[in-house]
Image (tube, grey):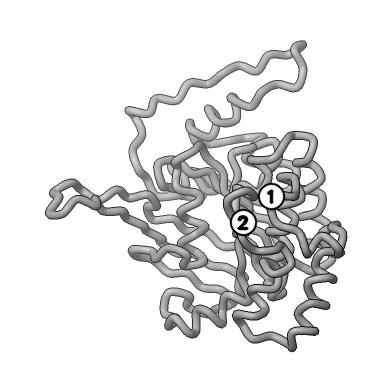
Amino acid sequence: MTPLLDVRHLVKEFHSARLLSKQAPVRAVDDVTFSIEEGETFGLVGESGCGKTTTGRCVLRLIEPTAGDVAFKGMDVRALSPLELRRARRHFQIVFQDPYSSLNPRMRVGAIVEEPLAVHAIGTSKDRRERVRSLFELVGLDTEAAAKYPHEFSGGQRQRIGLARALALEPSLIVADEPVSALDVSVQAQVVNLLLDLQERLGLTYLFISHDLRLVRQICRRVAVMYRGRIVEMAPVETIFGSPAHAYTRALLSAIPALTTQKKRERVAFDEASFEPMPLREVAAGHLAAI
């Protein structure tokens, strides 16, 4: 079966902004390959700066990849013209990490959610207003709140507004980029439960980007671990947590805070100086590691 999203040998390099600089480009994403099945929640994890957010944005062409292939439902995303890409974006959307900076403070939130519909010329003005009301109900917000501005909402409510905006065009794939990391712990569970409920009701597929390994274990089916722009291990979530093969994965898992003081988790050190980029190879069925 053809995967919903198929990423092959993705590369993203950033060059120095200094004129005539001889500094070598920074390879933020280096030969990244993975695929996501329809209806799946696929986790992309790693420490800050490892390239996971850049990967997600390259997949959607919010930033242009340097090399590699991205196929969505068999369609070559990198080959799309600007007009074709604009049309294709109806089918894949993003929920940003920061609910405070991702919403235009000068727009009422109803207009923010309606904007994608207007850009794609979907329905009449009345139809779009009705769609906004149904989206607010879908994400658990009062429909009367559409007349308010972003600053009048809490962080959790703003993330719900961002999710409503992402759902406006009825996408099948959502890149969730650290969607709860900027929220209070008490609110995180509510947003995660909403994401899971929407996935079941709407048949959504998630690329879930996070550094919270405990959260990833709860909601993802498969996980890819990134380090220095490369995927170093990829496997079903219980395999990653139960029998990690790469030294970095073991070190990352050992850093998860223990929920009880009765059994202290033994920390595993990772020697960064010894890291050498290696291709993924199959160490067990469905379990790939760069070793």
Answer whether residue 135 is visible to the viewer in this image: yes
Q: Nearer the viewer, residue 230 or 24?
A: 24
Q: Nearer the viewer, residue 27 or 264?
A: 27
Against 87, residue 43 (above or below) is: above
Against 28, residue 92 (above or below) is: below
Label 1 vs 2, first from the N-terminus: 2
Residue 240 position, x and y percent, is: 62, 40
Which residue is pictured at 50% across the width and 49% down the height? Answer: 52
The quadrant of the image that shows the N terminus is: bottom right
Name the kind of residue labelled 1 in the image.
Answer: His
Name the kind of residue labelled 2 in the image.
Answer: Pro
Crowding at dot 1, Cα within 10 Å, few <14 / some 14-19 / many 20+, comes out as: some
- Which residue sits furthest top? 262
Image marks 1 and 2: residues in contact by CB distance under 8 Å: yes
Which residue is pictured at 69% across the width and 40% down the height? Answer: 183
Question: Which numbered dot is residue 151?
Answer: 1
| Secondary element at tag 2 | loop
The quadrant of the image that shows the C terminus is: top left
Residue 160 position, x and y percent, is: 75, 55
Q: Where is mark 2, residue-wise?
A: 105
Q: Nearer the viewer, residue 50 or 167?
A: 167
Which residue is pictured at 82% across the width and 60% down the height? Answer: 145
Against 254, residue 5 (above or below) is: below
Which residue is pictured at 73% across the width and 13% down the height? Answer: 263
| Secondary element at tag 1 | helix
Residue 3 position, x and y percent, is: 61, 70
